[in-house]
Image (spheres, rainbow, N blue to C red):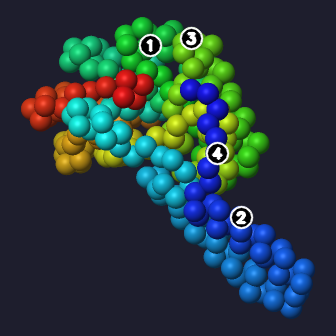
Amino acid sequence: MSEIRWRPTLLIRATLLLHGAAVALVAVSPVHWRWVLAALVANHFVLMLVGLWPRSHWMGANWTELPAAAAARREIALTIDDGPDPVVTPQVLEVLARYGVQATFFVIGARAERYPELCRDIVARGHAIENHSQRHRHNFALMGLNGITQELQAAQATLTAITGQRPLFFRAPAGFRNPFLDPVLSRLGLQLVSWSVRGFDTRVNNAQQVTRKLLAGLRPGAIVLLHDGNAARTPAGQPVILEVLPALFDAAAARQLRFVTLRQV
């Protein structure tokens, strides 16, 4: 995927116009600076709320489900975040192989550098590895243009060097973002992906509860989110994802849904 022309959304265009008008108004009539400041504060508050809404499309193109053609084919995508994990990921791969399911792994670059052979095994088994930033910084949504660019470029270089495949998709850490992300994605030729349904399996240690949440949103075109990195453990010490996957796969088969990677859509 080559560079994509950046097309700002209506919200971003309105923000740019507001800032331009604010500068002009203060230059012409400084006495109105309080009203200008209030308008800018309100605008930034809206941007913050939108940035904290992972499934929003107001800041740019965002896959919250698969394209309509994939949904018509009854396809769904399993996406797995925050790995690779040297303990959990190999077990996840065995479950996927047992059920013949291909998944998309959103991998952290720094973790890939620690476990490169595990990443190569993921790709060799027919799964896809995509960009989940280089360091998964908790302040990602507060970073500026240069910081976001460096995070994404570093992960692109890391994952391409390890797997031989250039990532085509990006998922923001925790799904949070700001207006600087979309132009960076366009420049790097990356498509932002969030999800249709998630079970909060990094925090909820009840596998049945996570499963019920996922099955409630399991429909054609769904993008399902689970975690091999930072996975919650059941009271018995089992990573939640390992108990959830068989039930998820059985339910998908019963509903005649077929798993594909994001690259296969």
- Badge 2 marks a residue whose secondary structure is helix
Q: Is residue 71 above or below residue 85?
A: below
Number of the label disc, if any, that sits on residue 6? 4
Could you give the CA–CA distance between mark 3 and mark 2, rounded to whole angstroms? 39 Å
- Work out whether residue 1 or residue 34 is closer to the camera in this orientation and state it: 1
Report the residue at 42% width, 25% height from top. Answer: 263
Closer mark to the observer between disc 2 and disc 1:
2
Q: Which residue is mark 3?
A: 164
Residue 218: x and y, percent? 22, 42
Could you give the CA–CA distance between mark 3 and mark 4, rounded to whole angstroms? 27 Å
Q: Earlier in the sequence, mark 3 or mark 4?
A: 4
Q: Which residue is mark 2?
A: 16
- Work out whether residue 172 or residue 186 is closer to the camera in this orientation and state it: 186
Q: Are marks 3 and 1 in contact (CB under 8 Å)?
A: yes
Residue 70: x and y, percent? 30, 34
- Badge 3 marks a residue whose secondary structure is loop
Q: Earlier in the sequence, mark 3 or mark 1?
A: 1
- Work out whether residue 127 or residue 113 is closer to the camera in this orientation and state it: 127
- Work out whether residue 37 or residue 134 is closer to the camera in this orientation and state it: 37
Q: Amino acid at mark 2?
A: Leu
Q: Amino acid at mark 3?
A: Gly
Residue 15: x and y, percent? 67, 66
Could you give the CA–CA distance between mark 4 and mark 2, rounded to whole angstroms? 14 Å
Q: Earlier in the sequence, mark 3 or mark 2?
A: 2
Res 129 seen here: yes
Q: Which residue is mark 1?
A: 123
Residue 227 occupies quadrant? top left
Instruction: Report whether 43 appears left or right of 34.
Output: left
Quarter containing the N terminus: top right
